[in-house]
Image: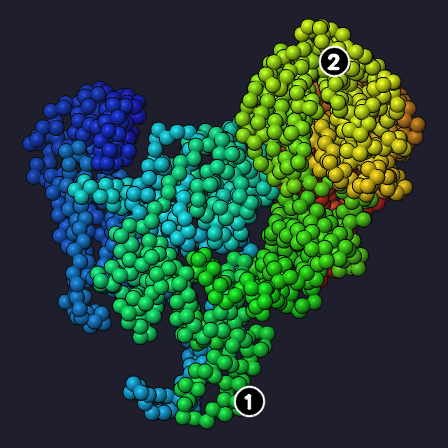
Amino acid sequence: SKSRINVVSIANARKKQSWQTDIKSALFYVNLARKCNSGGVRVEVLFDPDSEYMDAALNDPDRAEFLAERDPTCKKSSKELIEEILMMLKLPVNSLQSGAVSKRITYAESKSAIKADDEDEDSGAIVGIPLWLELHFRNDFRKSQIKGSQKTHFNELFRFFVKDDLGDSYIKIEVYTSTLFGKRLLGTTHLSLSNVPPHQIIPLTLSIDENEHGLIVAQVKLTPKTFTMPLDELKRKNNVRAKLKSSFPFLTLRDRHQTESAVDEQKLKELKQVLRVEANVYLDYPCCYDGLDHLGRVILRNLNQLGEQIAEDIFSCIRAHGNLQLSLKRPMDLLTLERENTGMLRSIEAVLCVGRNELLKSVQEYVHSIQSAPNRILLVCGSEGTGKTNLMAFVYNMYVKGIRIARNAHTGMLETISLASHNPSRRGHSWNEPEVIYLPLRLSLGGTDMRWFLFSLMTMLSEIYHGSVYPTFDSTNLPKNNALKLFPVPGEYNNLKLDFFNLCSVMDRLSPMRFVLIVIDDIEKMDPLKFDWLPMSIPSSMRLILACKSDTVVQSISSENPALDVVTCKVPPMSVYARKELLRHSLVPYKKSLSMEQVSVLIQKQDASSPDYLFLSSTSIGNFDRIGFHITKMIAEFEPTLTGLSHQILENMEVVCGRELLKHTLCLIATSKYGLTESELLVLLADVGMFDALKYRLTDEYSSQDKSALLNPQTPLEKRLERQKEPNARLPYGLWAPVRHLLKPHVYTSESSIEQLFAFRLQRFVRTLELRYNLDNPETVQGRVFFHGRLASYFRARADPELQFSWRGDDFRPVQCLVHHLVRANDWITTSKILTDLGFLELSVSLGNCYGLCSDLSHALLESEKNDEIFSRHRISELTDVNTFLNANADLLHTHPKLLLQMMANESNTSAVSRMALNRALNGWEGRNWLRWINRPTLASNNIRTLHGHKGWIRSLALTKDRKYIVSAADDRTAKFWIGESGAFAHELRGHRASITSVDISSSSRFIITASMDSSVKLWDIELQVELANLYVGSAAMSCAFSSDGKYILAGTQNSTLHLFTTSSYEEIHVLHGHRLGVRSCVFTNDSAKILSGGLDTVVMLWEIGKFVGKGKHVHAASSVLKGHTQGVRAVACNPRNPDQFVSGGDDCSILVWSLSKKDILRQFSGHTGSVYALAYTPSGQYIISGSYDSTVQVWSQNVQMSLHTFSGHSGPVFTILASADEYTCISAGADSTIRTWDLRGLLRVDVHEKQSTILVATDRTASAQSNLKSQYGCLNAISFSSDGVWLLSGSSDNTFAIRKTESGKLKCEPIRGHVAAVNCCQFHPEGQLVLTGSEDTFLKLWDASTNILISTFQGHTKSVTGTSFFNTGLKFASCSLDSSIRVWDVAYGRELFTVDSNLGHKNAMGQSECVRCCAVSPNDHTFVTGGDDNVIRIWDDRIRSSVRKFIGHRLPITACSFSSDGGTLISASLDNTAILWDLRASVVYTCKDHSAAVSSVAFSSSGRHFVTASWDKFVIAYSSSTFKEVARWPCRSACHSVAATSQYSGVVGCGDSTGSTYVLRTVLAPCAQWRFF
């Protein structure tokens, strides 16, 4: 049959490279139609517009020509493209000729349809494309009639009325046509109504035509028509109503008070009904006639009284109903309020940006510059009052609303235009529609703290990139799907900074690329002001605009990040034209206009070039003209300066509102932390000058009455005043209304989700009121301290309504502001009590104020250092403990606030936070379950600070002489500078091409040298941060040092040589040969006359520089060779107080003290279990500090020849040690990429006068130091309890297993090294006498637990053993391995009983055997279970030696499995982050999905009522087996790899992490059902 073939697959014909492939498939169907002799071919081609070429053709001809050369199809007309397509389809081109009857073709641009039809049709059809218009205005819609696309005119298509508050509203016009698939959008435009004069009837006229390129061009025209008749009368006239009949609402004066939201409108109707029913009815009308005043106006008595009664009744009804209740509560999400506050600021400030098109054009050129230099940021500088905030707000609106600055072709002036191609749905896909982030620091609700700023920035960026932040630990490889992985935004500043760096490094590699514009206003408000968060390289998909007062910020940015190119754009004073425009815009809300003479007088004032001055002038004219001021006279009396005008405005406001009420309102807002809400102000102002203010007003109105009646206690006035003293009293709204009206122009009234927040806009206005009311004068009674005290009392009552430290409030606002106001009110007693109260700490942390609490504590401790008398010594100690605890656990508590009490209770017994938590728990006041760390350390942690920032092992540390900087060098090829006092990151040096192994600073603290594995030693200038010299040493440089006199530079290399350079000419003067293996450490002696070097050849060599004279450049023999170590020497250090002594340490784990004169060993220290990598003397020379491969730092005394203390905290080897000059602290760093500061106070004390050191070490401290929980230094792969629960067995990746006491953690003996590879599994025999271990060395070994003697070795596996499990009888056990085998062994004879047939084992889809990861034996003693890489769990019967059942549910390999005590339930763990509970009869019971990383281990409690899971996300979680709800969780130091439960004691579990730490935890069940405090 002659059927028609439709070909509709030719899409995006505007891009030739995209439709050529579709042509091939279309050609196939055309040929098929010809062969089949079909009825013809119906073709529809879709033309997507080339928006880039269209914009360029209209605005940038050069750019359009460049695009046409790159792709000629974008320049061709639709007709030309159709001809080309028809030729490729081998269809006759002459069918396009006009007048053809056999075939009619219509075409148009912008996704129009091209139809080729074989049927004969009337040739008199519409010329062009049939189209129609759809108009959208807010929620209204209107559709026009259908017309053609060529020379079509819609005359006065719509007529609508514009009211005065449209603001930035616009009309959206869409053009549609009809295709085979329905209607198709041709184009969209937005018609702005911001410049349309108000109170006008506006007809809309629209013309459409096609240009020479086949583009549809639309021209819209608005012709205002004024009228003078009243609105209500106009609305009643039928003829006008017919003309205005459209979808746009006709708004009258009454309509302004109606809400736009349907929900709010319904609530308002309900409230009105309530008021009609419940409001009081006044039968006795209190008002009466009292004559006329001197102006002839009627005087009424008791009118104010009636108004107050009515207002009080109305608001009492409003407060009584929850749907419109004026709540004092604020949302806990501070970032949500921050966005609302920022949106409010943008909408206000952007209106005042007029006449600044030149500046806006510069900003626009920076954003759109295609060939801009890399690493360029724009800095907008302008003094206070020049309008830079207005400019930044307008920049945001400009890109969000599709507004651009362009030069008018006729006038040559710059003007704002709306982009026709503006499409908010495509935001972020190009620089025409970028994502915009606007951060005004001046009014940030989170403060100007650097951490909050970066947290806000990263949160907004994570939302742009679909709720994800690139992980800190992996920034080199993009994920497989080329999209960012989901990781939570961290809370700690250094982690935020690293995540921002990593995100910037991958932004340009993402697909699709997102274009982001970041605008930061008032950058100098940052506390502290630093720019270490700026990346070394700004991605091309990001633009950064900073606004500040002065260009000194450029120096700060360049000093911290010299790679960045900072372009400065200064904001000049406003021109005369800009001043006039600003006045006109500012007076629009007041419906005022000034004459030319009035404008001329005003703009000639001294400070009229400031937008702030003109803004204050316009607000004064708008507010005070309504109450009888003459405008011309008012302008003439305006003070010429901004300060004088502010005083003048305050005087006028005091006349209207009363001085006391206005003073308290302004001062409370000025002293508040982030502003105050209206409800807060009404409560705070309830008793402020009420009697005097009302009495003053009433005596004027009751001039003819007896004024003594006012003093009658029975009058309503006195009753009202008494009510103000009640706790819930509020300022009557009648008194507040004039204050609010006059205050509104001067404050930001943020329309948040619940209430308005009042905060001042102009800082100079704030300074004026501070001077006027003497806020900073200490002799003033109502000064700043007074108002801080009032705010503190108010917020205290909100957070603790009972004032009994019960803290029953659940409001974020008082928690955020309370301590801030207490400190500034100098109420130190209350401050110390609150900051050390557990209830307040938990309320703050639970409401998300953990970092704010850390800031408050730091500020309180800083004040205590300035004045020792404000806190007692006991309080300072408590505050210090709380501050140390919160800073160490802030990241954890920020994400898991419920763990606060548990973490505090598990601190050391000597810590104040532990006593606070245990006091509540032991008294039965805690209603939540928690885990108690049984084998916790008995002493408080000495780790007082931990710095993060490097991305590799830290090899070396150095300290400037003035202790200003700590310098660290690492494998990430950087040397980072940290501020010594605060620990904040300052800057870094880059230049080496390989790991930096050593760093040293000259005695003058001017220069620094770095040694690297790239065979170079670089000399740097610390102040300028530039490289001065690059010294080549031939092979990897492993150590470097400055001489004390600054004349020489020494470097030790991997090829066993030392190189000596001069600092004057950087010339290599000597090469020292003597070591047989690589040099690992080299130092100068104190007098710079000798050199000490230690190498892997086990010797220390002494070189005397004076003896090098005459021996040439190469010296082949040392002065002395000191032998004492049995293995390689890793560290050498000289005694700073005794020139004759030095110390060395090495791979033999020993520390040797030498005498230079005797060249003999004086003392020897032993205590480390790993190589000694770092040594340092304290400044007194009496103590030695060492760092080792065993991850510990030890302090040694030369007098008693013993270790004073061992610091455990590093999760890897310690490579470098520093001792501070005051002997109060030492600093260490190593393979865990952290820099830790340790507190030495209490361990040793320096007598300043005698310069001698005395030991103040208690015997219990020394004893407790020997009980170190971390005796194994690798990952704990397995944990097991003995049958009686007394002993704990652990197997580690350091090839050892250890047995220790469960309660104390004390080792039964030293860890046993019985394998040559990592111990992957270990288990006690059911009778407790034997221990079974399995290792990566493929062997299983049975040990006597009492004597540690090896009994049997089981051989059979060919790869790593991954799991073992004893049968209940203890006569045999099962094992599994990576060799895919499952074996059962006889314990008594030490032989293999059988191996499961490989054909029955774990296999993948291809039938290949998979690795077996775990095994567990059931209590019935006949079945056991295994899990493997095939994601399947198999149950085996040892009697038939075959699989009897399998469970499928996990998506990734199984890592662990365990049976319940009754054998009826099985739990399994997997790499898919889940643990599944299986019923052996009913399959899946429950799936645990609470972990964010792989679940590594699982276990059941002895009673079976609970089960425990451990994960690489560092958490151990206990669940209830009946309800499957979380009972408690425990955070380990690092990834948790093993967990076990005792069979003897219920509720006790043990776990081990990757740092080698063991945790024995007991579940503490709550004694009551509900917590007392919440």
Q: Is 1192 left, or right, of 466 in this rendering? A: right
Residue 991 % position (x, y): 55, 23
Is residue 198 shown above or below 1170?
below
Cα–Cα span, label 2 and label 1: 102 Å
Q: Is 1104 left, or right, of 62 in this rendering? A: right
x 31%, y 87%: residue: 294
x 26%, y 61%: residue: 601
Residue 999 % position (x, y): 65, 25
Q: Is 1466 left, or right, of 701 in this rendering? A: right
- For label 2, count other residues whose C-alpha is less than 10 Å away and answer few (under 14), some (14-19) or many (20+): few
> In the picture, residue 264 is in which quadrant?
bottom left
> In the picture, residue 306 is in which quadrant?
bottom left
Q: Is 1198 left, or right, of 1533 in this rendering? A: right
x 22%, y 36%: residue: 58
Residue that label 2 marks: 1106
Residue 297 % position (x, y): 30, 86
x 25%, y 50%: residue: 191
Q: Nearer the viewer, residue 141 or 1299?
A: 1299
Q: Quadrant of the C terminus?
A: bottom right
At label 2, the amino acid type is: Gly
Kindly identify which numbered label has been placed on residue 713.
1
Please, which colouring scheme is shown?
rainbow
Whether residue 859 appears in this view of the structure is yes
Is residue 1509 shown above or below 159?
above
For label 1, the SS is: loop
Kindly check if marks 2 and 1 are in contact, taking CB atoms under 8 A apart as contact.
no
Q: Nearer the viewer, residue 1529 or 1374?
A: 1529
Report the residue that reaches farthest toward the right: 1347
For label 2, the SS is: helix
